[in-house]
Image: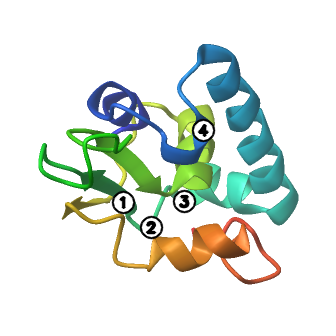
Amino acid sequence: MSPHEVEGYVDSFGDFGSAPADIARNTAFKRGESKESGMHDSIAAEGVKKPLEISHFDNTYGGEDSKVRGKTILSQGHHRWVSQNDADPDRLMPVVHHPNSWSGRGTARYMRLGTSGKNDPTGDQ
Protein backbone atom coordinates (compact mmCIF):
# COMPACT_ATOMS: atom_id res chain seq x y z
CA MET A 1 0.00 0.00 0.00
CA SER A 2 1.13 3.56 -0.60
CA PRO A 3 0.91 6.22 2.14
CA HIS A 4 -2.14 7.68 0.37
CA GLU A 5 -3.82 4.27 0.32
CA VAL A 6 -3.10 3.72 4.02
CA GLU A 7 -4.56 7.13 4.85
CA GLY A 8 -7.79 6.27 3.02
CA TYR A 9 -7.92 2.71 4.36
CA VAL A 10 -7.58 3.10 8.13
CA ASP A 11 -10.20 4.60 10.43
CA SER A 12 -7.56 5.79 12.86
CA PHE A 13 -3.84 6.35 13.19
CA GLY A 14 -3.88 4.89 16.69
CA ASP A 15 -1.92 7.15 19.01
CA PHE A 16 -2.24 10.13 16.64
CA GLY A 17 -5.73 11.02 17.86
CA SER A 18 -8.64 11.64 15.51
CA ALA A 19 -9.03 15.42 15.36
CA PRO A 20 -7.28 17.08 12.39
CA ALA A 21 -5.20 19.25 14.75
CA ASP A 22 -4.06 16.13 16.69
CA ILE A 23 -3.12 14.34 13.47
CA ALA A 24 -1.15 17.37 12.22
CA ARG A 25 0.66 17.79 15.56
CA ASN A 26 1.55 14.11 15.85
CA THR A 27 2.63 13.89 12.20
CA ALA A 28 5.01 16.79 12.78
CA PHE A 29 6.32 15.15 15.96
CA LYS A 30 6.91 11.77 14.24
CA ARG A 31 8.55 13.59 11.30
CA GLY A 32 10.97 15.34 13.66
CA GLU A 33 11.91 12.08 15.39
CA SER A 34 12.38 10.35 12.02
CA LYS A 35 14.63 13.12 10.72
CA GLU A 36 16.65 13.18 13.92
CA SER A 37 17.25 9.41 13.84
CA GLY A 38 18.14 9.33 10.13
CA MET A 39 15.13 7.17 9.25
CA HIS A 40 13.56 9.91 7.16
CA ASP A 41 16.57 10.16 4.81
CA SER A 42 17.01 6.39 4.66
CA ILE A 43 13.39 5.82 3.66
CA ALA A 44 13.58 8.64 1.11
CA ALA A 45 16.55 6.85 -0.48
CA GLU A 46 15.54 3.19 -0.09
CA GLY A 47 11.84 3.06 0.77
CA VAL A 48 10.17 1.29 3.67
CA LYS A 49 11.52 -2.21 4.34
CA LYS A 50 9.82 -3.27 7.58
CA PRO A 51 6.04 -3.69 7.13
CA LEU A 52 3.57 -1.26 8.64
CA GLU A 53 1.05 -3.04 10.85
CA ILE A 54 -2.68 -2.51 10.44
CA SER A 55 -5.07 -3.96 13.00
CA HIS A 56 -8.64 -4.86 12.09
CA PHE A 57 -11.07 -5.09 15.00
CA ASP A 58 -14.48 -6.63 14.40
CA ASN A 59 -17.70 -5.61 16.11
CA THR A 60 -17.23 -8.19 18.86
CA TYR A 61 -13.80 -6.96 20.01
CA GLY A 62 -13.69 -5.48 23.51
CA GLY A 63 -16.66 -4.15 25.44
CA GLU A 64 -19.42 -1.93 24.14
CA ASP A 65 -17.38 1.14 25.06
CA SER A 66 -14.26 -0.07 23.22
CA LYS A 67 -12.80 2.73 21.09
CA VAL A 68 -11.38 0.22 18.60
CA ARG A 69 -14.45 -1.96 18.15
CA GLY A 70 -15.22 -2.24 14.43
CA LYS A 71 -12.20 -0.08 13.50
CA THR A 72 -9.17 -0.47 11.25
CA ILE A 73 -6.11 1.14 12.86
CA LEU A 74 -2.49 1.78 11.90
CA SER A 75 -1.01 0.12 14.96
CA GLN A 76 2.72 0.17 14.11
CA GLY A 77 4.75 2.13 11.59
CA HIS A 78 3.76 5.76 12.13
CA HIS A 79 7.33 7.04 11.63
CA ARG A 80 7.72 4.95 8.48
CA TRP A 81 4.36 6.16 7.12
CA VAL A 82 5.25 9.83 7.73
CA SER A 83 8.71 9.44 6.17
CA GLN A 84 7.43 7.66 3.06
CA ASN A 85 4.53 10.09 2.73
CA ASP A 86 7.04 12.97 2.64
CA ALA A 87 9.43 11.25 0.22
CA ASP A 88 6.98 9.68 -2.25
CA PRO A 89 3.33 9.29 -1.20
CA ASP A 90 2.61 6.97 -4.13
CA ARG A 91 5.43 4.49 -3.48
CA LEU A 92 4.28 1.10 -2.21
CA MET A 93 5.17 -0.04 1.32
CA PRO A 94 4.91 -3.51 2.86
CA VAL A 95 1.91 -3.93 5.17
CA VAL A 96 0.90 -6.72 7.57
CA HIS A 97 -2.73 -7.07 8.68
CA HIS A 98 -3.74 -8.35 12.14
CA PRO A 99 -7.33 -9.45 12.86
CA ASN A 100 -8.58 -8.50 16.35
CA SER A 101 -5.06 -7.89 17.60
CA TRP A 102 -2.90 -4.81 18.03
CA SER A 103 0.09 -6.38 16.32
CA GLY A 104 2.66 -9.13 16.46
CA ARG A 105 5.03 -6.92 18.52
CA GLY A 106 3.18 -6.89 21.83
CA THR A 107 1.98 -3.31 21.53
CA ALA A 108 0.66 -3.12 25.09
CA ARG A 109 4.23 -3.47 26.37
CA TYR A 110 5.50 -0.78 24.01
CA MET A 111 2.65 1.57 24.85
CA ARG A 112 3.47 1.14 28.55
CA LEU A 113 7.11 2.08 27.89
CA GLY A 114 6.12 5.00 25.69
CA THR A 115 8.71 4.02 23.05
CA SER A 116 10.01 0.86 21.46
CA GLY A 117 11.95 0.29 24.68
CA LYS A 118 15.20 1.30 23.02
CA ASN A 119 17.07 4.58 22.74
CA ASP A 120 15.73 4.95 19.19
CA PRO A 121 12.00 5.76 19.49
CA THR A 122 11.42 5.21 15.80
CA GLY A 123 12.28 1.50 15.80
CA ASP A 124 13.31 -0.23 12.60
CA GLN A 125 12.97 1.14 9.10
Viewer-closest of 53 and 48: 53
Q: Can residue 23 be seen at all in this image of the molecule?
A: yes
Can you tell which mark lies on residue 49?
A: 2
Which amino acid is tagged 4?
A: Phe
Can you tell which mark lies on residue 46?
A: 3
Callout 4 crowding tier (Cα within 10 Å): few <14, some 14–19, many ≥20: some
Q: Residue furthest top?
A: 20
Can you tell which mark lies on residue 53?
A: 1
Q: CA distance from mark 1 to mark 2?
A: 12 Å
Q: Residue furthest front?
A: 64
Which of discs 2 and 4 lies nearer the camera? The answer is: 4
Where is residue 106 drawn, in percent x and y?
44, 79
Tag 3 or tag 4, which sits nearer the N-term?
Answer: 4
Which of discs 1 and 2 lies nearer the camera? The answer is: 1
Question: Do labels 3 and 2 touch, CB within 8 Å?
Answer: yes
Where is residue 6 drawn, in percent x and y?
35, 36
Callout 2 crowding tier (Cα within 10 Å): few <14, some 14–19, many ≥20: few
Q: CA distance from mark 4 to mark 3?
A: 25 Å
Which amino acid is tagged 2?
A: Lys
